[in-house]
Image (spheres, rainbow, N blue to C red):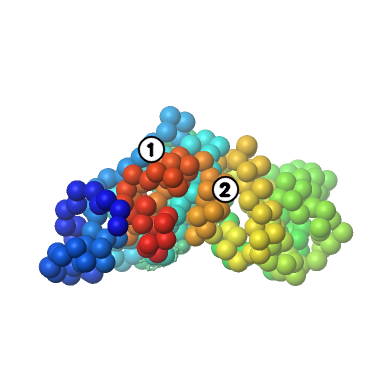
Amino acid sequence: MTNLPDTKLPDTQLSDSVVANANEPRGMDDVHKNEEFDVEINGTLGKPFVDNAKMSSRKCDVFYGDKQAIFDVNIDIAQNEILAMIGPSGCGKSTYLRVLNRMNDTIPICRVTGEHKLDGEDIYAKEMDPVLLRARVGMVFQKPNPFPKSIYDNVAYGAKLHGLTNNRSELDDLVEKSLTRAGLWKEVKDDLQKPGTGLSGGQQQRLCIARTIAVDPEVILMDEPTSALDPIATALIEELMTELSAKYTIAIVTHSMQQAARVSNRTAYFHLGKLVEVNDTDKIFTTPEHQLTENYITGRFG
Ligand SMILES: Nc1ncnc2c1ncn2[C@@H]1O[C@H](COP(=O)(O)OP(=O)(O)OP(=O)(O)O)[C@@H](O)[C@H]1O
Ligand SMILES: [Mg+2]
């Protein structure tokens, strides 16, 4: 067993099992068995804040009905960085990602508190239009979700909605440019009128990325964008992310630590709704500060 830091019994914000464990005998075997729960999460370790924040959250809590899913998350996402979010299933990664473009607004029982900014602007302000916000902060989901429309119309959709082009020829250019940047143009240029749903999974995901970048967002949120893809399609999307980060800020949720290590600049580790640690990706994967982060990256939890 690695050296455990000086620990206290956890507070009641952790799960029921933790509270139950708190009353159990504390022999070494028990400490070993329960070590993933035996460490207090008290604030966020590492470097959650940056000088050049594109987005930021302060005192973020999220509730589904009475159940709290996110506890006091404070973090910045830097301009042009790729931030990876990792952590065990159910720890709140998708919930927090959806805070950043108000996708949680679409879940009636979901309530988000705290302060959330894009370029210093309050994204939960009354005058902020969530539809426009989602054009500025685009999202790519785990399961590719092309609209039941042609490849062309999938990519042109947002530009038409927001009136970004003046005529057909400008729209054609935008569709070509977006598909090219998503690495899909060569594969689909002769099939633009075919349905987007007829493409392979990896192509569909690149189509969804093309659709997202066609409206020229500032931030792209990706929730396990490659978990349904084979290694070749995954590699293409990872390359694409690196290229896109020259222009955009990217936050990606992933269950693949190799992926986080390959693509991200900083990595954020979530545990039971709390943000345990954020730091440069190299540091998180070589010398994490928190025992829970170490447990997770060494495969002892989650
Ligand atoms: N629509 C919802 N209604 C009620 N509870 C929800 C909803 N979505 C998420 N939750 C709860 O919020 C908590 C965090 O879930 P979330 O989906 O954010 O986790 P996650 O880290 O993305 O997990 P995974 O890795 O499995 O995708 C979980 O306890 C989950 O059950
Ligand atoms: Mg999720």
Pick whichever, 75 or 212, lies toward us. 75
| Number of marks | 2
Task: From the viewer's perspective, tell me whether residue 254 is left or right of residue 66.
Answer: right
Quadrant housing the C terminus: bottom left
Q: Which mark is residue 262?
A: 2
Residue 104 at x, y percent in the picture: 43, 59
**Is 133 located above or below residue 12 in the figure?**
above
Q: Is residue 292 visible?
A: yes
Q: Which mark is residue 220?
A: none
**Is 271 located above or below residue 55 in the figure?**
below
User: What's the amino acid at mark 2?
Assistant: Arg
Circle 2 SS class? helix
Q: Residues within 10 Å of mark 2 (few under 14, many from 20)?
A: some
User: What's the amino acid at mark 1?
Assistant: Lys
Pick whichever, 120 or 79, lies toward us. 79
**Is 294 located above or below residue 26 in the figure?**
above
Q: Is residue 132 visible?
A: no
Q: Are marks 1 and 2 in contact (CB under 8 Å)?
A: no
Q: Quadrant of ligand 1?
A: bottom left
Task: From the viewer's perspective, tell me whether residue 168 is left or right of residue 91.
Answer: right
Residue 43 sits in which quadrant? top left
Residue 251 at x, y percent in the picture: 51, 48
Residue 193 at x, y percent in the picture: 82, 63
Q: Which mark is residue 47?
A: 1
Residue 245 sits in which quadrant? top right
Pick whichever, 7 or 277, lies toward us. 7
Q: Residues within 10 Å of mark 1 (few under 14, many from 20)?
A: some
Quadrant housing the N terminus: bottom left
Residue 40 at x, y percent in the picture: 23, 53
